[in-house]
Image: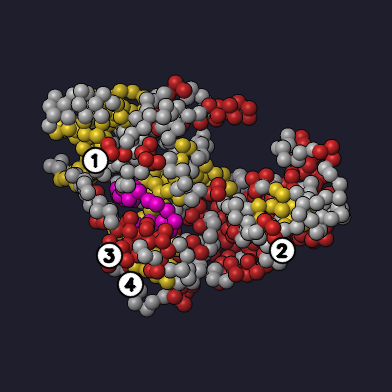
Amino acid sequence: MSTPTIQATASATGTVTRLLQRQILPLDRDSDVLALYVDPEDARLDADKYEVGGNASAKALNNAAIRQSTSTGRALHPDQIESRTALRVKSGDRLSFGTYFNAFPASYWRRWTVVTSVALTVTVRGSGATVIVYKSMARGNSQRVDAAETTTSERSSFTFDLTLKPFVDGGWYWYDVVAGDEDVVVESAEWTAEVPADRADHGTVDVAITTMNRPDFCAELLAQIGEDETLRPYLDTVMVMEQGTDKVSGSPVFARAQEALGETLRVIEQGNLGGSGGYARGQLESVRKGTATYTLMMDDDVVCEPEGIVRAVTFGDLARRPTIVGGHMFNIYSRSRLHSFGEIVQPWRFWWQSAPDTHTDWDFAGRNLRSARWLHKRIDVDFNGWFMCLVPRVVLDEVGLSLPLFIKWDDSEFGLRAKKAGFPTVTFPGAAVWHVPWTDKNDALDWQAYFHHRNRLVAALLHSVYPKGGRMIRESLNHQIAHLVSMQYSTAELRLLAMEDVLAGPRGLHDMLPTRLAEVNALRKQFTDAQLQVDPDAFPPVRRSKPPRKGRDTSEIPGRLSTLVSAGLQPLRQLKKPRQLAEEHPEAEIRAMDAKWYRLGTLDSAIVSMNDGTSAAFYRRDPEKFRDLVKRTVEIHERYRREWPRLAQEYRAALGEITSPESWERTFEPWTDETTPQRTDD
């Protein structure tokens, strides 16, 4: 395996030369991800002359045009990949390295690091080859910067000196290679920079992986990390927080991972404390040990690009101030699709979302980096998901560890907390993992609904800049009514429980961590809408006492006026007695994608499938239960309106204590080994 030729070279000027990024190719020659590494397509920026703006219809048209594929179907053969860093370009072909993993994200380096200029060194073998360097600006328009041509069949290296000065708002550098009358091998390309001598040494990282009953997935990830020769010098400790009963050590792949990682690997067994409890344990161990520069949170069910970890560490090393460096998430089932280019917490709604003027589920195989103008703007974020997130240890020392939230909002709350303390988060292009996409789940309906709602409220109480959380209370009420008219009584009950627990104050968060999941599941099982069946024949057949009025198809999305009318009338309809037969027979079978409140609200019962496609539940309308839940819903939301200022003050005052290492140590006591390493002074 090829390794970087330049790590840190001393200079007579009091600076050192550091490798920032190198050309890489897929580890397994996977054709599904080739578009992220090398691009045979022509850049067609003329296909993307659109601006986001105007009314809703104009935006819809613009978004459709922006997403339209420009691919011609031209593809590379995996055999053209000669090594991790070398690619063969066939005679007469032109290939671009203006791709997600091989273009240089100049604007991010310009904004967040001490780097002011870079040198690109490209090494090729073959006569008549041309190397052309390009740059883009924030609007996506590209410019040719420089070019060089080989005159011999022997190895030739070209170095291009490139300034970062014009990249304030966005822009990338990249290079294309054009082969002449014979094949050309692009052996390597390296982006280097002169940096202050005190930045010569690269940092090290404690990798913290929380796992529960995914032994093979987790073991494969460990092996992937351990077997990468380039990554190995950056690893301090790889910690697996084992919280399941089907343990990673039982996987057939674990022996391979153990051999690759050796003494670097540490498996820590504890009870199921959720993602926040697992990551907090890794953070605590890293802080107490005190030997690594960074702690890297990473999910157990991802496939990573090991080079991305090296790049994240390098970026963190050269950042102007301690900076959280996050990776992007690609779809593990459609590997050229990017989930989101960066995420924020919208302050008025206090809800996470993609950053403005970005596009989710972006397919780089259909629209490459060079043809999509929006990808050339620098995207600033509030937080990064902990599926891959590098946190400097000094940030953990300063702001504390994760909140004890079990799952949901722990990563976003931490990002907001760090930002308030002066530590930014950068979602860094070129650092990424492949993960199961959120779109294949509906965690707002199952047991996770409790944690979603409770933790969002906690985060808003801690960080909302608006009185009474902005739109938070009103939106909570709207969502609650939507669940009730949809006959999702278990979800409504869990959301009320979440609100009651928040009112009880922050001191109980640690105490509830080991037990709340079991209690939530026990409560949920009392409701028929949460009793899932895998066998379709487990439900009675669909029957109705009378057909829908005029045979109307209620699956159509209503217009704005119809939606407003329906929102006003549906709660009143819930008070009526259900139609004959509805208690024993479902009135319809509803696909998960169609299970919206405005459709379910017209029915008295239904079989509703789950988003993962594995099961379904029998929903039944219950007027008495509806009345009780509505009464309690109105009462608790009115209480939040009255008590928000007091609650916010209480949670903010307790934040330092409940995220402290000492508080987490008490929570971990039942599973703490007395020989846990203690922190050593640097």
Q: Which residues are magenta?
A: 294-316
State if disc 3 and disc 4 touch (CB < 8 Å).
Answer: no
Left or right: 362 with respect to 9? right
Within-10-Å neighbours for mark 1: few <14, some 14–19, many 20+: some
User: Quick check: 435 above or below 49?
Assistant: below
Left or right: 431 with respect to 649? left
Mark number displayed over residue 259: 3
Alpha carbon separation for disc pair 2 and 4: 47 Å
Sequence order check, earlier mark of 2 and 1: 1
Alpha carbon separation for disc pair 1 and 4: 44 Å
Alpha carbon separation for disc pair 2 and 3: 48 Å
How far across and how far down the image is residue 192, in percent?
23, 40
Mark number displayed over residue 82: 1
Within-10-Å neighbours for mark 3: few <14, some 14–19, many 20+: few
State if disc 1 and disc 2 touch (CB < 8 Å).
Answer: no
Sequence order check, earlier mark of 1 and 4: 1
Left or right: 585 with respect to 376? right
Q: Secondary structure at mark 1?
A: loop
Residue occupying the point 58% across, 52% down: 612
Sequence order check, earlier mark of 4 and 3: 3
Mark number displayed over residue 677: 4
Task: Out of 672 and 579, give the one closest to the viewer.
Answer: 579
User: Quick check: 52 above or below 36?
Assistant: above
Q: Amino acid at mark 3?
A: Glu
Q: Amino acid at mark 1?
A: Glu
